[in-house]
Amino acid sequence: MAAVLARHLYFSYGHDQVINNLSFEIRKGEYVGLIGQNGSGKSTVLKLLLGLLKPSRGMIELLGSPMNKFKKWDKIGYVPQRSGIFDKTFPATVEEIVAMGIVGRKKLFHTLDAQDQDDITEALGEVDLLPQRKKLITELSGGQQQRVLIARALAGKPEILFLDEPVVGIDTVVQRKFYDLLQHLNKDLGLTMLLVSHDLDIVAHEADYLMLMSEGEVCKCTKDMITKDKKRFTSFGHRH
Ligand SMILES: Nc1ncnc2c1ncn2[C@@H]1O[C@H](COP(=O)(O)OP(=O)(O)OP(=O)(O)O)[C@@H](O)[C@H]1O
Ligand SMILES: [Mg+2]
């Protein structure tokens, strides 16, 4: 079964057609890298798949359900592109933010139980932030805040993870741990993953295959194609 299906999607912000007849399918358990130059529409694709933006035409299915009937949002984890989400007054602690990743599977105002607390602890452990759990999010560095968002996505025990440049601003040791964690989630637990990244070498190595975004569409590229035509692909791996 397709975990994510997109057929003939179109989307524009005002006049600019950003997504132009985009179609792809991600099967359950696949680990897919999404690459493309700045402004090519990668983040827009994720927002369409999350229902945060609505395509002007076309069809999206998640886990076999059309978007307008899809209800299992707790099965979807999302790590947004880093963008100073927490302003200086954001009044939440690290563990409260991670708990938001669990609220999706709870009835409104239902208190968190022991299992939820365990899931929060496990998710914080996976990103090495246990000592910081009681701190205010604003007391953390940018890279640490990004790891909180990763923990929030993991705490809900999702089946699909959408990751928008999740490791930008994170030091290389923690990056490596994070990619190893993604491998574990994908290979051992069967999570489906769509990872946006500018780091072509890493993503080509980690993912099963890549989708290259250009002119509002994607083309599917195997690792072989990338190794054979490194020069062409390197321009898409433009770093920040
Ligand atoms: N909220 C918005 N309003 C208007 N235009 C937007 C908005 N968000 C993005 N765009 C435009 O849509 C295009 C695609 O943006 P998007 O953020 O999807 O690109 P991206 O591939 O994620 O880029 P990057 O690699 O820099 O993150 C860009 O031209 C951008 O300027
Ligand atoms: Mg982006």
Image (tube, grey):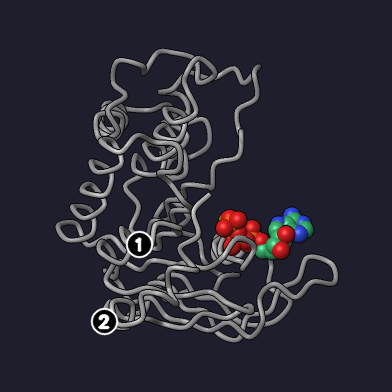
Q: Earlier in the sequence, mark 1 or mark 2?
A: 1
Q: Residue 51, which numbered label?
A: none
Q: Secondary structure at mark 1?
A: strand
Give the label, 1 or 2, closer to the camera: 2
Question: Which residue, as the protein is rendered here, is positioned at the far front?
Answer: 231
Residue at point 30% right, 26% down? 117
Q: Is residue 174 left or right of residue 72?
A: left
For the residue marked with disc 2, what is the amino acid? Asp
- Whether the residues at callouts 1 and 2 have beta carbons within 8 Å, the answer is no
Q: Secondary structure at mark 2?
A: helix
Rendered location of residue 71, percent (x, y) = 50, 60
Task: Reply above or below: 105 against 194.
Answer: above
In-front residue for pair 181/221 = 221
Q: CA distance from mark 1 to mark 2?
A: 20 Å
Rendered location of residue 92, percent (x, y) = 54, 20
Q: Quadrant of residue 214?
A: bottom right
| Residue density around tag 1, few if under 14, some if 14–19, many if 20 or more, within 10 Å | many
Rendered location of residue 150, percent (x, y) = 39, 40
Rendered location of residue 93, percent (x, y) = 48, 18
Residue at point 45% right, 59% down? 196
Residue matched to label 2: 224
Residue at point 50% right, 14% down? 139
Q: Residue 193, which numbered label?
A: 1
Query: Quick check: is the Cβ at mark 1 less than 8 Å away from ligand 2?
Result: no
State the quadrant of the N terminus. Answer: bottom left
